[in-house]
Image (spheres, rainbow, N blue to C red):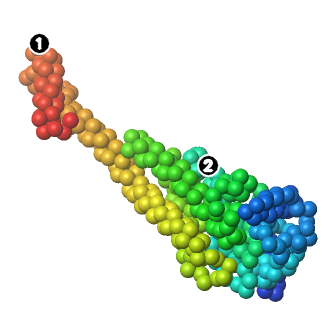
C-alpha cells in the first residue's frame, strides 16, 4: 500500500494525461494477443509489439486485442495513439486504483471493471481483484489486464467454435460478453463466501472460540472489499445499457440490461451476507455470555449446597468444652448425616425449580 501512495505522490506533479503505472510491477513483459473474426473466419495469434496491432485499426472484421500487463506505459501509450484513445483514458488504464465506470467518448466507449478471482472457500478467502479496462470502438475491443489469467476462456471458446451469435454480432456484443463473464464470476465468488458463512454460523452456535471472532472480522473486511468492487458496477452497467452511443446496437442493449439485472442480484446477495455477518458478532457475544452464565450457575449451585455444610462444620469445629454433642458416640455420624441431608434436600429443591 505504501508503494501505491508513493506512486501517486510522484504522479501528482505531472501534467494531466501523463501515463504513470500505479501498482506492483511484475517481472514479466507485456503480452498482446489478437483475435480477429467475423461470421465466416476466425484468426487468433500473439502480437510481437504494439506496432503489430496497427493494421487492425480499420478493418471490415471485428478485432479483440487483449493486453496482459499494463506496467509498460510506453506500450500502452503507443497502442492508445494508434487506436485514437484520449491521453486521459491512457492515464486511467495504467492507474489500477480506478473504480468501475463507463465513459462515452469521441469514437469509443471506455469501461472499467474489477475482476475477482481466487478460492473464496479457503481459510482466509483467498479472493483477489484486478482492474480490467475495456475500450469499445467501431470495429474493435481492447481489453487491458494487470496480469495474465482471467475469466474470459468461455468467451474465447465461443469465438473459436462459433457458438451462439457472438461471431455474427459486432464488437459491442463482444464487450457485453466480456462484462457478462466478469459479473457471472462474481456469483462463483459469492457462492464460496456463502459456504464459509454457513460453516462459521454452525461453529458459532456449537463452539464459539477466539478463532471464530477472528474469522468474523476477516469476513467483514472481505465484504467491504467485495462491496467496493461490485457496488459502482451497478451504476456503470446502468449507464452502459442506457447509453445512446452509435457503437452499441439496439439488440445488444437488451443483453446489457440483463447484465445490469445480474449486477443487482450480486449486490442483493452481498448485502444479505453483510447483514448475516454483522449479526454474527452479536451472536458470538451472546454465545459467550450464555456459556458464562451456565458456568456461573453451576458454580453458584455448588457454593449454595456447600454453604450449610460449611456452617455445620464450622459450628462443630469451635472445640468448646461445654458443647453437649462433643461426647456423643454417634455425634460424628449425625453431623455427616445432617450435612448430606441438607445438601440432598437443596439439590431436590433446585431440581423441582428446574434450575438444574
- Between the C-alphas of marks 2 and 1, the distance is 78 Å
Give the quadrant of the N terminus: bottom right
Report x, y in % for residue 304.
20, 37
- Answer yes or no: do the residues labelled 2 and 1 have beta carbons within 8 Å? no
The residue located at (81%, 81%) in the rendering is 84
> In terms of image quadrants, where is residue 330?
top left
Residue under circle 1?
A: 329
Relative depth, front residue between 177 and 337: 177
Please state, as top left, top right, bottom left or bottom right, where the C terminus lies in the image. top left
> Where on the picture, by quarter, is residue 177?
bottom right
* Residue at 29% in and 38% down: 299
Residue 145 % position (x, y)? 75, 64
Between tags 2 and 1, which lies in front? 2
Query: Crowding at label 1, few (<14), some or many (≥20) Cα neighbours within 10 Å?
Result: few
Image position of 116 with respect to 139: above or below: above
Residue 188 visible in the picture: yes
Q: Position of residue 33 (x, y in %)?
A: 82, 61
Query: Quick one: 261 or 112, which is closer to the camera?
Result: 261
Disc 1 is placed on an element classified as loop
Image mark for residue 41: none
Q: Nearer the viewer, residue 60 or 308?
A: 60
Q: Is residue 24 above or below residue 245?
A: above
Residue furthest to the front in view is 40
Q: Residue 320 location, x and y as percent? A: 16, 27
Query: For mark 2, does the 10 Å Cα neighbourhood hold few (<14), some (14 to 19), or many (20 or more) residues?
Result: some
Task: Give SS at disc 2.
Answer: strand
**Residue located at (79% from left, 60% from top):** 41
Mark seen at residue 119: 2
> Could you tell whether 292 is left or right of 181 in the image?
left
Q: Is residue 215 above or below residue 18?
A: above
Amino acid at each position: 500500500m505504501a508503494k501505491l501512495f508513493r506512486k501517486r505522490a510522484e504522479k501528482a506533479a505531472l501534467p494531466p494525461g501523463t501515463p504513470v503505472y500505479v501498482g506492483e510491477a511484475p517481472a514479466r513483459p507485456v503480452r498482446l494477443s489478437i483475435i480477429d473474426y467475423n461470421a465466416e473466419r476466425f484468426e487468433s495469434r500473439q502480437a510481437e509489439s504494439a506496432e503489430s496491432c496497427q493494421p487492425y485499426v480499420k478493418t471490415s472484421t471485428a478485432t479483440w486485442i487483449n493486453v496482459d500487463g499494463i506496467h509498460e506505459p510506453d506500450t500502452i501509450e503507443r497502442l492508445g495513439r494508434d487506436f485514437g484513445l484520449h491521453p486521459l483514458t491512457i492515464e486511467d488504464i495504467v492507474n489500477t486504483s480506478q473504480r468501475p465506470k463507463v465513459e462515452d467518448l469521441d469514437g469509443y466507449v471506455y469501461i472499467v471493471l474489477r475482476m475477482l478471482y481466487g478460492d473464496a472457500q479457503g481459510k482466509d478467502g483467498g479472493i483477489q481483484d484486478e482492474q480490467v479496462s475495456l475500450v469499445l470502438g467501431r470495429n474493435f475491443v481492447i481489453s487491458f489486464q494487470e496480469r495474465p489469467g482471467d475469466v474470459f476462456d468461455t468467451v474465447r471458446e465461443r469465438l473459436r467454435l462459433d457458438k451462439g451469435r457472438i461471431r455474427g454480432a459486432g464488437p459491442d456484443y463482444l464487450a457485453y460478453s466480456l462484462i457478462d463473464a466478469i459479473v457471472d464470476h462474481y456469483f462463483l465468488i459469492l457462492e464460496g463466501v456463502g459456504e464459509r458463512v454457513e460453516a462459521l454460523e454452525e461453529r458459532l452456535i456449537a463452539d464459539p472460540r477466539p478463532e471464530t471472532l477472528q474469522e468474523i472480522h476477516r469476513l467483514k473486511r472481505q465484504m467491504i472489499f467485495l462491496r467496493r468492487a461490485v457496488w459502482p458496477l451497478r451504476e456503470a452497467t446502468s449507464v452502459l445499457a442506457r447509453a445512446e452511443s452509435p457503437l452499441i446496437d439496439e439488440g445488444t442493449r437488451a443483453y446489457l440490461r440483463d447484465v445490469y439485472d445480474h449486477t443487482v442480484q450480486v449486490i442483493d446477495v452481498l448485502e444479505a451476507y453483510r447483514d448475516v455477518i454483522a449479526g454474527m458478532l452479536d451472536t458470538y457475544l451472546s454465545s459467550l455470555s450464555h456459556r458464562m452464565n451456565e458456568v456461573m450457575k453451576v458454580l453458584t449451585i455448588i457454593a449454595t449446597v456447600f454453604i450449610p455444610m460449611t456452617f455445620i462444620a464450622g459450628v462443630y469445629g469451635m472445640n468448646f468444652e461445654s458443647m453437649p454433642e462433643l461426647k456423643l458416640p454417634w455425634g460424628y455420624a449425625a453431623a455427616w448425616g445432617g450435612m448430606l441431608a441438607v445438601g440432598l434436600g437443596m439439590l431436590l429443591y433446585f431440581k423441582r425449580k428446574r434450575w438444574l
